[in-house]
Image: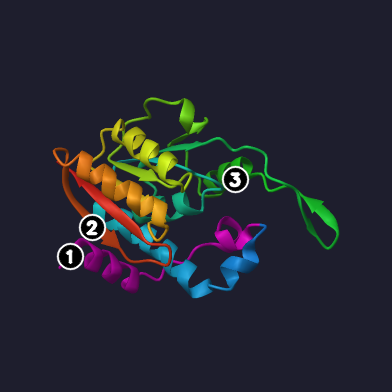
Amino acid sequence: MTLNEKIQQEADLSDWMPEIKYSVFAQPDNEFYYSHEAGFIRKYKVFRAISKILQPESITELGTCAGASADAYLDGVGWKAFYNGYDAWWPAAPYYVDGVEQDWDRYSICKSLFKDRKFKGYKLFKKDLRTLRKVEKADLAIVDAMHDYRNCYHDLNLALTAEPKHILVDDTAGIEVIQAVEDWVYLNACKVKSMDKIEQINGACIITLK
């Protein structure tokens, strides 16, 4: 059974579901996510399954946003992994609900998530990833920040500084992301054991390091 097949099987068997208020369905652009509801529910079940299968003791995520992915990854290991979350958390444009201005404060939402889960094993770093040359060490490093070629390639190099066993890259359905991954894997062949494509609505891959 391939790694993707193991992950899909685990996602099939799990009855876990993303909690709406900490999911993409609570974002200002939630109409888009609701228009592909089944696909995005499946995506986060797959994220949980990845963590469940790989069993990292520590996670470093580049592109934490409001914590929707972190919720899935950490649930997959029973909230027993240490989590390092990186994001610039630049102010988002205001949006309106019934004519009332709302603030999508992703950093505060992420903090609220961890508080609700009674989870204290984490650090959040408000950083522009382009200013960093290394990140906190972790078994699993996750690349899910900017999705253009140059930034994704940079984030792969940054993820490597975590000295991980695995690098998970989200959104590989995007042409620039998958090009960055393929080029990075080719140029780092001496460090890469395997690359497995993971099925979900936006595509993903897991790079296993030697």
Q: Range of the magenta residues?
A: 1-27
Q: Is residue 17 magenta?
A: yes
Residue drawn at point x = 42 percent, y = 69 percent: 42
Assess disc 1: are there few (<14), some (14-19) or many (≥20) residues with their C-alpha within 10 Å of its C-alpha.
few
Q: Quadrant of the N terminus?
A: bottom left
- Upstream in the sequence, badge 3 or badge 1? 1
Asked if one can make out residue 72 in the rendered structure from this viewpoint, the answer is yes
Confirm or deny contact between disc 1 and disc 2 (CB under 8 A): yes
Assess disc 2: are there few (<14), some (14-19) or many (≥20) residues with their C-alpha within 10 Å of its C-alpha.
some
On the image, numbered disc 3 is attached to which residue?
Answer: 112
**How far across and down, in percent of the image, does residue 123 sit?**
47, 33
Task: Name the element at disc 3.
Answer: helix
On the image, numbered disc 2 is attached to which residue?
Answer: 196
Q: Amino acid at mark 2?
A: Asp
- Upstream in the sequence, badge 3 or badge 2? 3
Nearer the viewer's eye, disc 1 or disc 2? 2
Q: Amino acid at mark 3?
A: Ser
Taking depth in this image into account, of 113 and 69 the one nearest to the observer is 69
Assess disc 3: are there few (<14), some (14-19) or many (≥20) residues with their C-alpha within 10 Å of its C-alpha.
some
Residue drawn at point x = 41 percent, y = 45 percent: 149
Q: Amino acid at mark 1?
A: Thr
The disc placed on residue 176 is: none
